[in-house]
Each structure stands twice: as C-alpha cells, then as structure tokens.
Image (tube, helix red, strand yellow):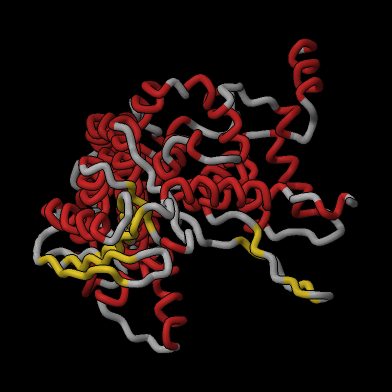
Amino acid sequence: MSDRSRLSRGDKRRNARIARLREIVTRDNAVLGLDLASSKQVVVVTDHDSQVLARRTFRCSPGQLGPALAWALAEATKAGFRGLTLACEPTGHRWRVVGELAAEAGIAMVCVQPMLVARAREAEDFTRDKSDDKDAVLIARLTCQLHVYVPEVLSPVWARLRHLGARRVEQVTRRSAARQQVRDLLECVWPQVLGCASKPFDAATWLAAMRVAGCDPEKVRGHGTLAAFIAAVAAELPAWGARRVYRPILAKIWAAAAAPVSLPGQRAAAIERAGYVLGDLAHHAHACGQVETEMTAVIDELGYTALIESFPGISVVGAAAILAETGDLARFDSARALVKHAGLCPRENASGTYAGKTSISRRGRPKLRLAVYRAAFAATANNEVYAARYTHLTTRKANPLTNNQARVAIGAALLRQLYIVIVTNTTWDPAIAAGGTTKQGTAQQEAA
C-alpha cells in the first residue's frame, strides 16, 4: 500500500473521539432525549434507530426530574435495554442540575449543541416547525448519530474561577461603558478638560480630580486656590490606586475650569449626569480590581502562577481570564482542539480548483475569543517573539495580513503555547515559541 492510504492525524483523532463517545452512548443502552424548560420537561425514550419507545411530559422544574429518570430507566429495561444514556441541550443552567440527578441515578449524560438541533429541525421536513416534543426526538436522534459531546464537570476550584471570570467580564464591560459615557458628556459641555492628560481615563490624578469636582468646573474653582484643589485631589487619590498627584495635570484642569461655557442650556444637567456616571466608573473599577485579585489567588491555588509569569507579555490576570473560559486545559486532546474551542481555527472555503477566502470559524466560546484577543494586544507589545511575528505577518510580501488578522493569528499561537506550558508543566521557552527545537531552547538558556 502507498503512503496515501495512511490515516491522517485528523482521522485518528476523530476515530478516537467516536470510540470514546460510543463507550458512553453504547448500543446496549436506550437513549433518553430531554427537552428542558423552566416548568415543562418533555422526555422521550428511543432505540438507536430513533424509534420512540415511550414519551411523557412532566410538569415540574428540572431539579424535580428524579422520578422522570426512574420512569425512563424502567421503560428502557422493559424494552430490553441494559441501561439509559441521557441527552439534552446545554441551555441555561438547567442541564447542570439534570447532570447531578443523572449521576446520582448512575445514568450517563451527553449534550447536543443547540445549533445542531436547529439544523436537524429544518432537515426533518424542510420546514421551521418547532415543538418541545419534536425537539426531544431530534436530540435523541443526534445522540444516536454521536453528534454529541461529554459536558465538562467542574471541580470547586475551577467552578469558582469560571464564575469569577464571568463577574470580571461584566465589570470590565460596565467600566468601559461608563468611561465612554463620561467622555461623550464632557466632549459636549467641558471638552477642554479631556485635553489635560494624554490618556485621561488611565490617569489616576485626572480621575481623582474629576471625582472631587463632580466633573463640574465651578466646583474646581470653588476650592479657592490651586493648592487647596491639589490637597483635595491628594486625599481622593488612594481610591484610584495611586499615592502621588501629578501636578501638571491639576494645573491644566484648574486653567480649563475658566474656559468659556458651551451648551449653557444643557451644561448643568450633563455635568450632573457625568458626575453620577463617574461614580459608577469608580464602583466598577473597584469591583473589577477586587475580582481580579480573587482570580489571581485561584491561579496561585492551582499552582500556575510561576508558569504564567515565565510567559512574557501575558499577565496572571489575562491568563486567568482565558482559563476561566477554557476550564482545565488537560481535558483537551491537543492545543489544536483548544484553538478550535475558542473559534480561532481556520475555516477553509475550497472546492476543486477553487480556493476562497479563509477566515476563522467563530464557532467557539465568544468570551474566550475576547479574552485571547485582549491578551494578544499585550503580548504583541511586550513579547519579543510575538512582536517579531506580528511585524512579519503584516509586512511580508506574499499575502500580508491586516493588523487585526495578525493579532488573531498571534492569539491562536498564544493559546496553543499556553496549553503546552500548563499541561506539560513547562516554563515558556522563547526559542521554541519562535519555531525552534527543544535543544535550541536548552542551548540558549545555558548560554544565558
């Protein structure tokens, strides 16, 4: 036989995944298709040809489905099956409660992607007809075809990191919205103050001054003298994570407070609103810092702090945001699987001699892509390997990438390398990261 008959790496991994799923969705078990809702649960028991053996609707919450599982198991046994495999869509939080009930009853559980159910619904009779009873049958049918995955079971530590990560995303989003809103309001009624610092919303002195004055120039001048204003700002400064005021910024704010009034009809109301929003900004910034401290403590508890600190350009908080979305990296078969989970893998568009534009799949976790993309910005600026890679991707003669495309490529590389660092418990090696070998990296470390 020629080499062409050999299985590819993808074939082998797919075969192994199918074998693992077949051990769970064994042919000796009937399939329980479950369509979950808040107070109505549709239960369907089928064989592996998708023939319905029993059907029943339970008017209860997901946490009260214990009798439903016992009934389904009895129906499967009556039909000659040894056991039962439960399948449902991972929508909301209800499936986690069902997973606990299934584990207590000794029933294996798998999940079906809602997108696959939607596609199967259209393929069923070429209509968009939808009902809970039909969806339960479709879930069971997709399970028989092994279009399922085994849901992640979080340990208490990983569960805490997952929820802290979700909390951080909320606070970062709200903080960013408050910053933009304050900027928009001040641009209308007091634009001069925005030019008092090169990056005003990153300057603790500027933020403390705005907090003291309530974004109102009259309150700035109300302190009487510049020295009194500086003293008031210095007392507020620790709340923004700084100790020493930057006097040139305060001098510019003092001068800007005497600028001509713009939009006199709206100025007072807009300034009052800006003061309220600045208070929201302070609250969300404090909450974000607090949750980041907790996430850092969880990373330290997992023993990953030293590994991440060996990775230039990525902070412990940035890595924690990524790990909060991925969970334990050891559950992935390879780094490629992790990149696919993030939706950063290439999506080919080719047929015969036609080769269309290749883009990323965007089929993974959106929040994970966001965390990786943010980490890629910092890595490009602070990591020599990624900086060189970014320059190469954007300036090469053949098929140069845009700035955004290059950062996406670097984000995928960062995710692959983070996987290797964490799973193999190995510090980051710049020589290997740049495309070298383990021997080259060892030689460079010895020379250093």
Front residue of this view, candidates 394 and 241:
394
Please indicate whether residue 172 sits to the left or right of residue 387 in the image. left
Name the image quarter holding residue 436: top right
Total tally of numbered discs in the picture: 0
Find residue 442 and report its horizontal and vertical position in percent.
Answer: 76, 17
Question: Is residue 82 visible to us here?
Answer: yes
Please indicate whether residue 328 sits to the left or right of residue 205 in the image. right
Front residue of this view, candidates 84 and 434:
84
What residue do we see at 48% from left, 38% from top?
331
Name the image quarter holding residue 157: top left
Front residue of this view, candidates 295 and 75:
75
Picture layout, residue 29 above or below residue 292 = below
Picture layout, residue 22 above or below residue 120 = above
What residue do we see at 78% from left, 59% from top?
400
Find residue 257 and report its horizontal and vertical position in percent.
Answer: 31, 53
Name the image quarter holding residue 428: top right
What residue do we see at 61% from left, 22% from top?
427
Question: Is residue 217 visible to us here?
Answer: no
Q: Quadrant of the C terminus?
A: top right
What residue do we see at 65% from left, 59% from top?
346
Please indicate whether residue 366 sits to the left or right of residue 313 in the image. left
Find residue 36 and report its horizontal and vertical position in percent.
Answer: 23, 64
